[in-house]
Structures are given as C-alpha cells and as structure tokens.
C-alpha cells in the first residue's frame, strides 16, 4: 500500500491565499453573457476588473479523496447585480460540497436542475452544505473581498455549461441600498 503524505497549510485569513496552491484568476471578460445588464457589462469591460481568484489544492480525480480551495470574490456590481462566481453543477452531479465563510459578506445561490433556487447568507464562520445535484454560485453583497473555503470530492469536476447558457432562475441585486433576490427576466427552463 502506497500512502499519501498528510498536509497542513495555513490560509492567510486576511487575503485568502493558500501557500503553494494553484491560483486561478477570473476577470470580467471571462464572464461574458453572465450578467443581465449587457450595457453595464460592456461599460465595465473597459476596465476589465478581476472579479475573483481561486487558490486550489487538488488531488487526482479519484473517488474518496478531497480537494480544497479558497475563493477571493471582489466587491462590485454590473448594473444592479452584485459580482458573483460563474456557478456550476459538479460533473459528477451527485457530489456534495462544504463551504466555510472566512471574511466579508455575501451568500450562496443554489439551484436544482429544475430551477428551484435557494439563497443562503454567508459571513465569517458560516458553514454551507451544498447537497448532491445542486448548482452553486457565491455572491459578494458587501464592500470588501468576500473570502471562503470550499471542500469538495476530488472526482467532482465542474460542469459550467448549463449555468453559462441559462444562468440561475434568481438574481442577487441591490435595490434602494438593500440586497434583494429577484426573478431572472432571462430565465428559461
Ligand atoms: C468547487 C467549488 C469552488 C468554486 C470557486 C469558483 O467545486 O471547486 O465550488 O472552489 O469552483 O468558488 O467558482 P466557479 O467554479 O463557479 O467559477
Ligand atoms: Ni463546486
């Protein structure tokens, strides 16, 4: 039997950085078609800000093993919509996931393949259980980076297709200074 080595790393709780992790950067240009207000999107694209960064420690895609990653989701809006991660189902759709809030303020939008949506607010210390089959997207509703840890099966994979095409049935927007969950006018089942 070949055993893997255990590993302990310290997440920088101020910046979300995991030393030695693989870093992924998503800019606004990587999120084309994701936001409802296309005019606001084109306008902000001139600056093309970083929307989020992911620091991932990943294993081979084998069942039984675990990956973990922090995400640093920056504050901002496109029109009335708060900055968010792309959102995905897992390629192995029955793989669940755990999130843990580290810094800042936001929430998670979850959705079944039939379009039933749920919104769960997150702050430092919040644990979110993402059940099998639910798509998940995080949203920064605050004015500082929203940082969280995700732990997920090593063989879960990411299926971005359906969310990239259809989005979520709900949007997270600012209305009169408040966070509101509203119907997505472009949602089609
Ligand atoms: C995962 C996690 C999480 C997620 C990031 C970026 O399954 O790996 O849900 O690490 O990937 O928060 O979000 P997107 O993958 O939707 O861009
Ligand atoms: Ni996931």
Image (cartoon, rainbow, N blue to C red):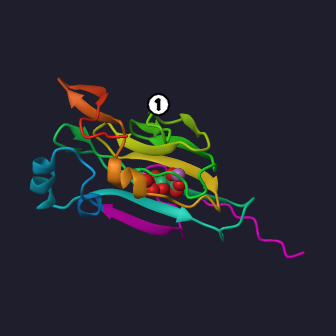
Q: Which residue is mark 1?
A: 120
- Left or right, 150 with respect to 180, comes to right
Q: How many marks?
A: 1
Q: Name the residue at 39% across, 36% down.
A: 105
Image quadrant occupied by the N terminus: bottom right
59 lies above or below 94:
below
Residue 109 visible within the image: yes
> Residue 158: horizontal and vertical position, in percent?
51, 59
> Residue 99: horizontal and vertical position, in percent?
55, 43
Q: Main secondary structure of the magenta part?
A: loop
93 lies above or below 19:
above
- Is residue 3 shown in magenta? yes
Which residue is farthest front? Answer: 189
Image quarter of residue 127: top right
Q: Secondary structure at mark 1?
A: strand
Q: What are the residue bounds of the magenta stretch?
A: 1-26
> Residue 38: horizontal and vertical position, in percent?
15, 50
Q: Name the residue at 12% across, 48% down.
A: 40
Q: Name the residue at 41% across, 58% down.
A: 161
Which residue is farthest right? Answer: 1
Please state which of residues 103 and 169 is positioned toward the viewer in this rendering: 169
- Left or right, 28 with respect to 18, comes to left
């Amino acid at each position: 039997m070949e055993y893997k080595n255990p590993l302990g790393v310290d997440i920088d709780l101020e910046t979300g950085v995991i030393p030695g992790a693989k870093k992924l950067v998503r800019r606004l240009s990587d999120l084309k078609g994701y936001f409802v207000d296309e005019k606001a999107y084109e306008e902000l694209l001139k600056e093309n800000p970083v929307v989020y960064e992911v620091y991932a420690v990943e294993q081979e895609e084998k069942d039984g093993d675990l990956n973990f990653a922090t995400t640093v989701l920056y504050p901002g809006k496109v029109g009335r919509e708060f900055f968010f991660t792309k959102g995905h189902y897992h390629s192995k759709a029955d793989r669940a996931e755990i999130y843990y809030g580290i810094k800042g303020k936001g929430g998670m939008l979850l959705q079944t393949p039939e379009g039933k949506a749920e919104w769960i607010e997150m702050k430092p210390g919040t644990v979110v259980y993402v059940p099998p089959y639910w798509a998940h997207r995080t949203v920064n509703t605050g004015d500082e980076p929203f940082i969280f840890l995700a732990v997920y099966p090593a063989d879960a994979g990411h299926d971005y297709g359906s969310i990239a095409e259809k989005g979520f049935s709900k949007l997270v927007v600012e209305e009169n200074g408040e966070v509101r969950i509203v119907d997505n006018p472009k949602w089609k089942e």
